[in-house]
Image (spheres, rainbow, N blue to C red):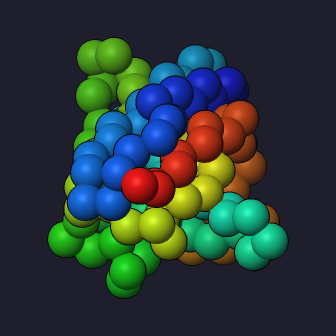
Amino acid sequence: VQLQASGGGLVQPGGSLSLSCAASGHAVSTYTMGWFRQAPGKEREFVVAIRWRGSTYYKDSVKGRFSISRDNAKNTVCLQMNSLKPEDTAIYYCVADASYSGDNGDDYQYWGQGTLVTVSS
């Protein structure tokens, strides 16, 4: 199983950015897929997950601003981020697991490389 994240970059506060995670070796429709992030000098934190049945679970601070979606045909998961704030600045990591679907990063078996999101004016 391999995960390839892309889409990071520099955006102004209030702006939008879309991250993509391309999966190989498994079908995203059969795994829990999610995103974590780690800001400089801070602990890694859960952002969002989409379970294989399609239900979603968001970190409170991103609810209403971030949206996760899954494209089964392309075997990708996307994270649409709107109304970005400077505190959203972090390296974002795509994760996957065949059974776990919570917010503990240590329980996700597969991690992609990170993609850097910088929110700054």
Residue 27: percent from left, percent from top: 46, 27
Closer to the camera in the image, 8 or 31: 8
Q: Is the residue 47 above or below the residue 33 in the image? A: below
Residue drawn at point x = 30 percent, y = 26 percent: 72
User: Visible in this render: residue 78?
Assistant: yes
In which quadrant is the C terminus drawn? bottom left
Foreground pick, 92 / 118: 118
Residue lying furthest bottom = 60
Q: Is residue 39 found left or right of 7 in the rendered image? A: right
Residue displayed at 52% across by 28% down: 6
Q: As drawn, which residue projects farthest toward the front?
A: 121
Residue 79 position within the rendered picture, expressed as x and y whole percent measured from the top left: 35, 45
Can you see residue 99?
no
Could you tell whether 41 is left or right of 20 in the image?
A: right
Q: Residue at x 42, y 76 (%)?
A: 59
Q: Position of residue 46 (x, y in %)?
A: 56, 69
Q: Nearer the viewer, residue 33 or 79?
A: 79
Tell how many labels: 0
Q: Position of residue 99 (x, y in %)?
A: 58, 56
Q: Is 96 located above or below residue 61 in the figure?
A: above
Residue 18's image quarter? top left
Specify the quadrant that holds the N terminus.
top right
Using residue 108 as the reference point, say whether residue 52 is left or right of it. Answer: left
